Amino acid sequence: MTIKIVRNLALVLLALVFFSFVVPKGWHTSGSAEDKYDIGVWKIGGHDSSKNCGVIRSNKNDYFETDYGSLMQTFSSQQYLGKRIRMTGYMKSRGVKAWAGFYVRADKENSKEPLTFAHMQDRPIKGTTDWSQYKLEIDVPYNASKVAFGAVLHGQGQIWFDDLSFEIIGNSTIAADFVLCDTSLSRTPVNLNFEQ
C-alpha cells in the first residue's frame, strides 16, 4: 500500500513539473467545454526527441457527445490566397474514448461558416496510439481573410501534438472575388513546435 501511494505521489509531482497550463505563445484555447480539459504545454517527450509539445487532456468523468477542447491558432490568409495548402502534424494519444485529431479551415471575415474546412472526424484518432504523422489539405480562396488550425479532443482521453507545418501544394480550384486579409493577425503561423 505504501509503495503504491509513493508511486502515485511521484506521478503527480512529475505531472506538475512537466505539464504547464500556460497557453503557448501564438496559440489560444477554444471548445464547447474548455473547463473539462487541461490544455497547455507538455515539457518533455515531444515528437522526434524535441523538448516540448502541445497537450489536451480530459479532467472530468462525465462527457456529453458535443464536449470538446481545442488548442488553436489563427493567422492571416495573405500569403496563401488562391492556393491549396497542406498542413502536416504529429499526434499521439492515450485512452481517447470519442475521437481526436487535427483541423484546418479558411474563414471569411464576419462569417460564422468556414469557406473550406478539413478535419479528421472521418479518420479519427481513438484509444492509445504512438506518434504518427497526419496531413490535411484545403483550398484558400481569394475571399478568405484568415486561416485557423489546431488540435481537438472530443470526450475523455489525452493527446499530445507537435511539429506542425504548412506548404503550398497547388492553386485553389475555388473561384472567388478578392477581399482584404485580416492584417491584425500574424502573416504566418508561429511556434509550431511549442518551443517558444
Image (cartoon, rainbow, N blue to C red):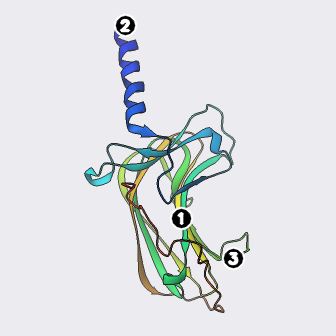
Q: Which residue is mark 3?
A: 109
Percent of width and height locating residue 185: 56, 71
Camera-side residue of 178 and 64: 178
Q: Which residue is mark 2?
A: 2
- Disc 2 vs disc 3: which is toward the camera? 3
What element does badge 3 sit on?
Answer: loop
* Position of the N terminus by quadrant: top left
Q: Give the CA distance from mark 1 to mark 2.
A: 45 Å
Pointer 2 or 3: first along the chain: 2
Q: Are marks 1 and 2 in contact (CB under 8 Å)?
A: no
- Vertical placement of 127 versus 107: above or below? above
> Is residue 64 left or right of 2 when viewed as pictured?
right
- Disc 3 vs disc 1: which is toward the camera? 3
Looking at the picture, which amino acid does disc 3 mark?
A: Glu
Camera-side residue of 97 and 112: 112
Crowd tier of the residue under label 1, counting other residues whose Cα lies within 10 Å: few below 14, some 14–19, many 20 or above = many
Percent of width and height locating residue 149: 53, 65
Percent of width and height locating residue 82: 54, 88
Looking at the picture, which amino acid does disc 2 mark?
A: Thr
What element does badge 1 sit on?
Answer: strand
* Position of the C terminus by quadrant: bottom left
What element does badge 2 sit on?
Answer: helix
Q: Give the CA distance from mark 3 to mark 1.
A: 16 Å
Residue at 66%, 92% in the rendered image? 177
Looking at the picture, which amino acid does disc 1 mark?
A: Phe
Crowd tier of the residue under label 3, counting other residues whose Cα lies within 10 Å: few below 14, some 14–19, many 20 or above = some
Q: Are marks 3 and 1 in contact (CB under 8 Å)?
A: no
Q: Give the CA distance from mark 2 to mark 3.
A: 59 Å
Q: Is residue 157 visible?
A: yes
Q: Which residue is mark 1?
A: 149
Crowd tier of the residue under label 2, counting other residues whose Cα lies within 10 Å: few below 14, some 14–19, many 20 or above = few
